[in-house]
Structures are given as C-alpha cells and as structure tokens.
C-alpha cells in the first residue's frame, strides 16, 4: 500500500510546472534577443542614413543621433527629470485613486445581483463617454495644477479595474462555492475566502490596463492645461519646432510606461503565484 | 424492493447500528426551460446507520449526485424529509464531511491551510485542530507536504488532501461524490483500499456515489442501486463480503455474483455510463 504512495511522492518532487520549460525556451529566447538587437541597430541605422542622405529637415524628422543628444542634454540639465517626476506622480496618483475606486465600486456591484442590475446601465453609459472629452471640464473644476491631472488620470484608470473586478468576482468555480456552502460558510466568508482570490488575476489585468491609461490621462491633461509635466514640455518643444526634443520626451514617456507595466507584472506574479496561467503576466494593450 | 431500513450487520461487527440519516419520501423537481418540470428524484426512502458504508450506484441522470447535494445542504429538496438523528436536516450541517470528484483545493492555500478550511469556516479551535490535520496527512501518506501548494501535488495526492479536509473537524458522516472518478485505474484501486482503512480507523458513516458497479460492491455494506428518469431506488443490496477486504475480493465468487446481479438490474454490461 505504501509503494504507490512512494511513487507519487517522487513524481511530485520533480520540478514544479512551468519551470521545466526554461531549458528548451532559453535557446529561443537568446535567438530572439539577438534578433531584436539586430532589428534595433538596422532600424536606427537606416533612419539615420535616410534622414542624412535625403537631407530631411531636422524640424520634420530629426536623426536618431540628434534625438540622443537632446535626450542626454535634457537629462543632464535636470529639466527632463523634473517634468518626468511631475507626470510620474500624476500617473501614479491617478492610477492609485482610480484603481481603488474601481475596486471598491466593482466589489460592491459584483457581490450584489441587485446592485449590479441597477448600476449596469450607468456603468455602460459612462464607459461609452470618451473620457478625454471630460478633460476641459475637469481642468475647470480642479485647476491647472497637479490635482486636475490626477483626477483625469483616475477617471480613465477606474473603468478597466471596475469592469474586471465585476467579471472576476463571478469567476469562482461553482464547486468551490458549493464546498464552502456545505461547510456552513456565510456569504461574507465565501466572498473573502474564495471569490476575492479568484478575482485577483482579473483585477490585476485590469490594473495593468489602468496603468497605461493613467499615463495617457496625465499627458492629455497636460496638453489641455498645465504648468509642468512631459505633456506640457512636448507642447513647449513643439512651439519652438524642437522636433528632436519631442522625440526625446516620447522616449522618456514610453520608458516610464514600460517600467510601470513591468512593475504591475511583477506584482501580478507575486500576488497570483498559484495560477500557472497568469504567471506570464498580463500583456500590454 | 428489499427493506432499506434493515441494518445488515454485514460488516461482521455484530454491534447494532443506530440510525444516523433518515430520508423519507424525498422528491426533487427542477423547473425546465419552457415552463415544464423535470423530475430528478422520486420518492427516495433510505435509512443509514452510524458507521455504515453505503454506496449509491446508477447510470447518468439517475439523480445520485442530486441526492448527495441535497444531503449536503447545497440543493433544496422539493418534498419529503431528511433527518439527522431524528432532527430535521434542512441545510448545511457542521457534522458533514464532503469530497467531490475533483479535489476542489483552494490553489492559494497550502495543503495544511486547505485541510483546516472547515475548522476556519466553522470557527473551531485552530490550534487544537492543527495537530489533527497533521495526523490525517500522515495517515494518508502526505507527511512533509503540509506547507506545499496544491499545484505541487499529483491528482491522487490532491484527492487525499480533500479527504483529510473532510475529516479534520470530526464530522459524523462523509459524503463522497465519485471521489476517485478522475483518477487512473491503478491509483483508484489504491485509493479504495486506503478509504476502507480510513473508514475503519475513523468509524465514520460514509455515503459514496459512484458509477462503477465493482467499486460500489467492493466498498459497501449496502449498495443502493438507482434507476433514471425519474431517479428512483431500484434496489438496496446488502453486501455480505467479509472485512477487511483486499483486492482479492475482486476475484471471489460472491463478489462476482453481486456485480452480476446489479448489472442485470440495469440490463447492461460493465460500466454504466461515460
């Protein structure tokens, strides 16, 4: 009777699922990395050559080298860092407030069929409003400072978290709820022992989308009315036909977006460690 | 139909068994799409004694799982009564242990945390039950796995964890819905033997649903054979095979006679559905 048990023990001592794929995958990964660098070098080199060869005015399309110089100067002087910091804080603040609001509202709606039905038409109609159209209004309400950008960012970021929370709270398998019910669990116990955990992968995917949208919200807000931030700086550079400067700022923005996306992906892997399907992390939208 | 109420004493122990569960005139109908009604269970009468091992066998659609869900308090009955030691049983009870076909372990909890789930939900003394949980894990050959996560365990090991979870709070009866249906044949035989050992050691009443006739006969004091559409009890068959039972039982004449008899009952050969 112990022999089969022993066999099972050794079977389970083998590497956990997912880890075993590293070896065959690593070759592919290395090749892909080499190819990516190659694409980058050829692309940038080609760009440089075309702009120089055809004498394209720097105002229309600058050379990559000019962009790099602008990026370096802006970073060294501290100008970019100051504005980057402003946009970063706006995005993060907007994300935090928006995600928290989405989570709370989604939690309330997702656990009550009555509230879900009552709220649903409003959620849908609000979701169809292009949030960017609210920006001028929000600037009137919150002023030209940091507050309005955080508010815009939060408004945009809230929706994916809200929607995914509602869906996620429905994701718990029937059997897990049945099991808890049979063991005399209350509705609140079922919510916090099962439904909340099953919703986490959905919520985190919503957060990933929200993070990207929060940055967009902050930059759009800065376009409409601001005294600082990378969006504000882009408009300023645009006014002086400093196209290389604009590109440099766009690179900064995308760098910030990637960093924030990776942060969410890291959090996702840490929080939902048990779900092999979500270990890959959510993809960007 | 034989008298379902008669305790059999077939397990060899002559001790008189007291009644634990009494199911009387139980009916279950569902509202069908388009306004009709579907009769899932019709007039189920069953008495189950303490420490008895009862298996329920029948083809798909005979309502055997529905019956189990009603006993577990997950589904409501339409008519009739269920009594636990003479008291009406109208919903979930703290005296129940439950095992599904799949382990249904919570993936974000360690093995030990999963086993302690009923203790936690029912606000029982966690510290006191921790030792019990570890004992159960040792008894099912899972010592050393308490801090592992379910995805690190094989299917058979996961199902053992779910059996430990069903026993940790010392319930008076165990409901098992095709508990080994998802396992391969080899593991399944081992699990059957282990279940009999656990049953002997813990003295629980077990009600086990299966669609394997040999499994039903091998485990049971009594086999409840059900027929479909609507689900009814076709016959209750006392199994007089001596205990403790080993895999040799499968080749005995008496065993073969019981299996053949139940097969005849369904007018089929071998497994009932799938």
Image: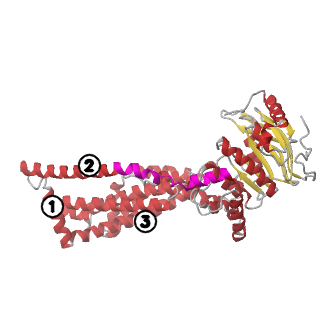
Tell me: residue B215, above or below residue A15: above
Please name which of the two marks, 2 or 1, marks the residue nearer to the observer. Answer: 2
Residue found 53% across the figure and 55% down from its top:
A199
Of residue A91 and residue A38, the one placed in the foreground of this image is: A38
Q: Residue at x 27, y 64 (%)?
A: A225
**Residue A241 horizontal side relative to residue A182, left or right:** left
Using the numbered discs, state the Cα–Cα distance from disc 1 to disc 3 in whole angstroms: 33 Å
The residue where tag 3 is placed is: A97
The reply to whether discs 1 and 3 touch (Cβ–Cβ < 8 Å) is no
Image color mode: secondary structure
The chain identifier of the residue carrying mark 3 reads A
Q: Residue at x 24, y 53 (%)?
A: A37
In this rendered view, identify the residue nearer to me: A135 or B40: B40
Percent coordinates x, y for residue A43 in the rendering: 19, 49
Mark 1 secondary-structure assignment:
helix
Residue identified by numbered label 2: A35
- Residue A239 tag number: 1
Total labels drawn:
3
**Lower sequence index among marks 1 and 3:** 3
Question: Would residue A114 appear left or right of A159 to someone viewing this image?
Answer: right
Residue B93 image offset from top left, x and y in percent: 77, 56
Q: Which residues are magenta?
A: A3-28
In the image, residue A252 sits, relative to residue A18, either above or below, namely below
Coordinates of residue B28 in the picture (x, y in percent)? 77, 40
Which dot, 2 or 3, sits closer to the camera? 2
Q: Is residue A144 visible?
A: no
């Amino acid at each position: 009777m112990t022999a089969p048990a022993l066999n099972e023990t050794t079977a389970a001592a083998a590497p956990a699922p997912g880890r075993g794929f590293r070896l065959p995958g690593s070759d592919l990964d290395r090749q892909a990395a080499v190819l990516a660098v190659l694409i980058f070098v050829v692309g940038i080199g080609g760009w440089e050559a075309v702009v120089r060869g055809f004498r394209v005015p720097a105002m229309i399309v600058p050379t990559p080298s000019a962009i790099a110089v602008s990026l370096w100067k802006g970073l060294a002087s501290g100008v970019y860092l100051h504005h980057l910091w402003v946009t970063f804080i706006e995005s993060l603040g907007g994300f935090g407030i928006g995600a928290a609001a989405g989570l709370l509202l989604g939690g309330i709606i997702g656990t009550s069929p009555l509230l879900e039905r009552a709220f649903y038409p409003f959620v849908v109609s609000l979701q169809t409003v292009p949030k960017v159209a609210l920006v001028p209004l929000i600037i009137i309400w919150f002023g030209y400072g940091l507050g309005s950008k955080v508010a815009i960012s939060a408004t945009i970021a809230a929706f994916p978290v809200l929607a995914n929370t509602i869906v996620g709270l429905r994701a718990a398998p029937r059997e897990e709820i049945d099991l808890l019910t049979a063991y005399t669990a209350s509705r609140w116990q079922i919510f916090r022992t099962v439904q909340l955990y099953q919703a986490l992968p959905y919520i985190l995917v919503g957060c990933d989308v929200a993070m990207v949208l929060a940055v967009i919200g902050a930059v759009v807000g800065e376009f409409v009315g601001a005294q600082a931030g990378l969006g504000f700086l882009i408009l300023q550079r645009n006014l002086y036909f400093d196209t290389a400067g604009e590109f440099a700022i766009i690179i900064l923005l995308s760098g910030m977006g990637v960093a924030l996306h990776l942060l969410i992906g890291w959090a996702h892997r840490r929080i939902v460690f048990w779900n092999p399907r979500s270990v890959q992390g959510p993809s960007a939208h | 139909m034989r008298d379902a109420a008669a305790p059999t004493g077939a397990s060899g122990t002559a001790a008189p068994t007291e009644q634990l569960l009494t199911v009387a005139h139980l009916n279950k109908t569902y509202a069908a799409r388009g306004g009709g009604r579907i009769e899932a269970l019709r007039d189920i009468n069953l008495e189950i004694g303490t420490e008895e091992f009862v298996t329920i066998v029948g083809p798909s659609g005979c309502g055997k799982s529905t019956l189990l869900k009603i006993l577990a308090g997950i589904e409501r009955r339409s008519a009739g009564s269920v009594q636990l030691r003479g008291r009406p049983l109208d919903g979930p009870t703290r005296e129940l242990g439950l095992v599904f076909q799949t382990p249904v372990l919570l993936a974000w909890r360690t093995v030990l945390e999963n086993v302690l789930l009923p203790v936690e939900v029912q606000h029982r003394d966690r510290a006191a039950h921790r030792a019990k949980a570890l004992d159960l894990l040792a008894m099912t050959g899972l010592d050393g796995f308490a801090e592992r996560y379910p995805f690190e365990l094989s299917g058979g090991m996961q199902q053992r964890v779910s059996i430990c979870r069903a026993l940790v709070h010392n319930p008076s009866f165990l409901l098992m819905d095709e508990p080994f249906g998802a396992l391969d044949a080899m593991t399944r035989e081992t699990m059957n033997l282990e279940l009999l050992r656990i049953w002997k050691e813990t003295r629980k009443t077990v009600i086990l649903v299966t669609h394997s006739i040999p499994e039903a006969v091998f485990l049971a004091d009594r086999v409840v054979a059900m027929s479909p559409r609507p689900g009814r009890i076709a016959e209750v068959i006392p199994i007089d095979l001596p205990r403790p039972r080993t895999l040799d039982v499968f080749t005995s004449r008496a065993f073969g006679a019981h299996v053949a008899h139940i097969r005849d009952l369904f007018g089929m050969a071998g497994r009932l559905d799938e």
